């Protein structure tokens, strides 16, 4: 009977540690090997350096803060670090949650038995990594938007009320038979165009009459339009891009 050797996972201790070599600074060598392993594991999932590099820098900052190596980290280190991010650095809750999530991803790799970092650390240092990020010491995601309240996007209900108000201004101007009806109609239309095509302010200011035409893809082009501006064309294929019709 032929026994096949089980292949090591990308990011495992077996792939990153060199056996039979005495390290001058074994703790630093182990930590660097962990980071290499985590990078390899993320690369195997298709993540780019633009994502991996900031994560690695954050782990190094946490190492400096805790002044301990990963196999010595405890939930208390996470508690103290999270408190410092809030009380000293005054970071937004969404940023703190992102940092905590990064640390959770790193430690989950270390405690996963398939990667072998626990036994490697216990053999070398008599200690092994444990989970330090739990539901009770990390921020939950309870709100849809957690940024500056003055800069948050409209909800659908708020957006509908805003567009209805813009339409009401047109009707009010027409009813009063005073100047301003055309300007109100222009503004109401532009608000809908901005929403319909996801335009930015600069893009909206550069629109011209020639940027609009009948929608040839529509079964009935009566009452429909499509944007042909250069800026809109560059965004096709994205969630913000063209293809949206405005009635």
Image: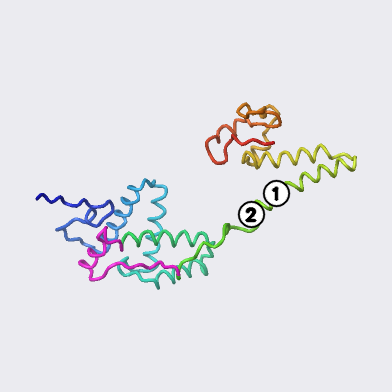
- Residue 122's x, y, as percent? 23, 68
Label 2 crowd bin: few (<14), some (14–19), many (20+), radius 10 Å: few
Quarter-wise, where is residue 58 in the image?
bottom left
Report whether 217 appears left or right of 121.
right
Which residue is rendered at x = 52% and y = 36% of the image? 237
Task: Tell me which colouring the rendered structure shows.
Answer: rainbow
In terms of secondary structure, where does tag 2 sit?
helix
5 is higher (above) or lower (below) than 196: below
In terms of secondary structure, where does tag 1 sit?
helix
- Residue 128's x, y, as percent? 27, 68
| Residue nearer the viewer, 133 or 49 | 133
Which residue is rendered at x = 75% and y = 41% of the image? 188
**Residue, disc 2:** 151
Given contact means CB atoms under 8 Å apart, are the residues at marks 2 and 1 in contact?
Answer: no
- Residue 115's x, y, as percent? 27, 58
| Residue nearer the viewer, 152 or 242 | 242
Frontmost of labels 2 and 1 is: 1
- Residue 111's x, y, as percent? 31, 63
Q: Residue furthest right?
A: 177
Quarter-wise, where is residue 176 in the image?
top right
Mark 2 vs mark 1, CA separation in Å: 18 Å
**Residue, disc 1:** 160
Tell me the magenta residue range: 111-135
120 is higher (above) or lower (below) than 236: below
| Residue nearer the viewer, 119 or 88 | 119
Quarter-wise, where is residue 149 in the image?
bottom right
Report whether 186 appears left or right of 36.
right
Residue 128 lies in magenta, yes or no? yes
Report whether 55 appears left or right of 87.
left
Instruction: First in sequence, mark 2 or 1: give its number.
Output: 2
126 is higher (above) or lower (below) than 145: below
């Amino acid at each position: 009977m032929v026994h096949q050797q089980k292949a090591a996972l990308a990011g495992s201790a077996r792939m990153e540690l060199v056996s039979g070599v005495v390290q001058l600074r074994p703790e630093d060598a182990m930590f660097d090997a962990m980071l290499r392993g985590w990078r390899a594991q993320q690369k195997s999932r298709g993540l780019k350096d633009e994502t991996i590099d900031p994560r690695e820098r954050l782990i190094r900052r946490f190492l400096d803060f805790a002044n301990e190596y990963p196999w010595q980290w405890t939930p208390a280190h996470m508690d103290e670090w999270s408190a410092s991010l809030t009380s000293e650095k005054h970071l937004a809750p969404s940023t703190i949650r992102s940092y905590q999530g990064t640390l959770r991803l790193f430690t989950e790799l270390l405690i996963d038995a398939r990667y072998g970092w626990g036994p490697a650390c216990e053999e070398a240092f008599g200690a092994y990594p444990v989970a330090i990020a739990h539901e009770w010491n990390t921020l939950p995601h309870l709100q849809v938007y957690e940024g500056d309240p003055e800069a948050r996007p409209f909800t659908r209900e708020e957006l509908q009320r805003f567009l209805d108000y813009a339409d009401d201004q047109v009707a009010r101007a027409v009813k009063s038979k005073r100047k301003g009806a055309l300007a109100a109609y222009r503004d109401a239309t532009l608000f809908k165009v901005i929403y319909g095509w996801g335009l930015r302010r600069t893009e909206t200011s550069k629109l011209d009459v020639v940027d609009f035409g009948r929608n040839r893809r529509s079964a009935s082009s009566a009452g429909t339009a499509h944007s042909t501006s250069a800026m809109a064309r560059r965004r096709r294929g994205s969630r913000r891009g063209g293809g949206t019709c405005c009635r």
